[in-house]
Amino acid sequence: MCSPYFVNMNPFVSFVIWISLLSSFHSFHASPMQCKVSLNESCPASLYYYVPNTMRSLDETASLFNVDNDAVKRTIDGFLIMINCSCLAEHRFFTWHMDYKVQKGDTWNSISSKFGFFVVVAMSEKVLIPSVIVTLDVLCGCSNNADMVTYKVQNGDTVFTICSRFKANETKTVLLNGLDNPDSIHERDILFIPTPAGFNNLTSIDYHNQEFEESMVSSIGSDKATVLPYNEIREATSNFSRSLIIGQGSYGLVYLGKLRGTDVAIKQMKDTNSKEFLSELNILCKVHHINLIELIGYAAGGESLFLVYEFAQNGALSNHLHNPALRGHKPLPWTTRVQIALDAAKGLEYIHEHTKPYYVHRDIKPSNILLDSNFHAKIADFGLVKLSEQSPDAGGAAASRIVGTFGYLAPEYVRDGHVTAKSDVYSFGVVLMELLTGQPALSKDASPENEKLSEHRSVVQYMLSALNDSQDSFDELAKCIDPNLTSYDKDSLYEMALLSKDCVDDNWKRRPDMSRVALRLSHILSSSREWEEL
């Protein structure tokens, strides 16, 4: 969580690269720090500089900003650059003057790009002559109450994750920036972040700092995620023994660990994946539900970031559906499958309808549904979650890029990037079909004419072809059912198959919401238990 305290410090500054002339403010949120008689006329400052595209060295960065190497501090995804901010004569805002030597082929846009697009070009009519020195005004600010960081919002940022990085007070940050809705910040917005610990103590930016590793809560039993020291993570995983690896995702390995006498799952991510790390940390610190995996703590060290979760003893649902015998598992009974479906539906219903803002998971699949010792399901892996300021039934917005797993992606999402809670409903419908058939979302199906050639078969098309048979749909459906599922309630199974069909409707508006899905599954579970007792 963002720090609940706010400490008076020596006057400090905020920063971000701008080429003065503020006519570009209309393109994104930015409120420049105005010169005031009550503030000092100058103060130390710093730039939080994201490295654009290709990684720069510390020497290259110091040269680019025309500062000494000692004024540059490396962070997990860029550099912190010390400058001096001042309120010059005839200037309404605090600025830092930076000299830049024009290079051959430079344009104002390419100069902006060199500085990670912190630079807002508003003097494009001025001709750039190679080897000539031009002065760039960098917008900054001073305050008598706190050290401040001027920060450019990156894709995936929230006020919470930004405050977490800088150990800042979330409420004071919102007030300082005049944010009517703190959930509506956008990429390239400019925010001033008041840092209570002072500029030299921003250890949440430098995750390898010893002070960060020691700033931990003594007990895991807390409603808030605990900051854990790196050496505990190493000990918990026997120095990252490969024998303790229990999973592998798109962002790294997952280890089984023993932390303070408790079994835990530890996800290791490269420190270059800081956005995904902070996104998942942000979500799991805010949402708490019995059917969502619980975050215990987090840590950093050794060029890695770590998220520590409760351990799900029976692993991922996918291991119990797809060739379970090869993984040493018994087939899941019918009633257990329905219970798992209902648990997962309740977890999705919670993030879709009972949180604000609402969340869309965007990667619902059996490998992201974990099973505890009693085979109750918990949704995991929130690295791709997208928040929505609109209600779950609203039309949503277009995503800038398609993420998720093929076979589970809703057609409107693939077609035009249209993201709503109904995208998750489609993915959940695919999971229901996998529970019924035991087949993965996509599988290679050998052609009868030439077994060497194969194509992907979709479980959705496989199931829909059976359910759309007008003659005797259940007879056709029975041919699709998991052969490991030798006993089931015929009526309940048919109802679940029809529900799965509704969830994968091509028209997202016709798909049921997750509260309706959960209600239908609860009725199916009741019927299945009555059948089981006969």
Image (cartoon, helix red, strand yellow):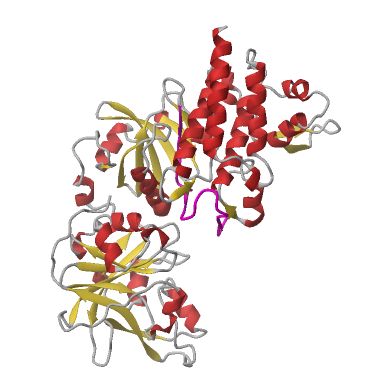
Give residue 194's quadrant in the image: bottom left
| Residue 94 is covered by the magenta coloring | no
What is the x, y in percent for residue 499?
63, 32
Q: Is residue 237 above or below residue 477?
A: below
- Determine whether, in the image, residue 37 is placed left or right of residue 346: left
- Determine whether, in the image, residue 110 is placed left or right of residue 282: right
Q: Is residue 529 above or below residue 235?
A: above
What is the x, y in percent for residue 193?
28, 65
Front-lying residue, 93 or 345: 345
Residue found 64% across the figure and 57% down from its top: 416
Residue found 24% across the figure and 33% down from its top: 221
Front-lying residue, 289 or 191: 289
What is the x, y in percent for residue 425?
58, 40
What is the x, y in percent for residue 393?
55, 49
Residue 110 visible? The answer is yes
Residue found 19% across the figure and 59% down from its top: 201
Region in magenta:
377-401
Considering the image in quadrants, where does the C terminus appear?
top right
Front-lying residue, 490 or 330: 490
Give residue 93's quadrant in the image: bottom left
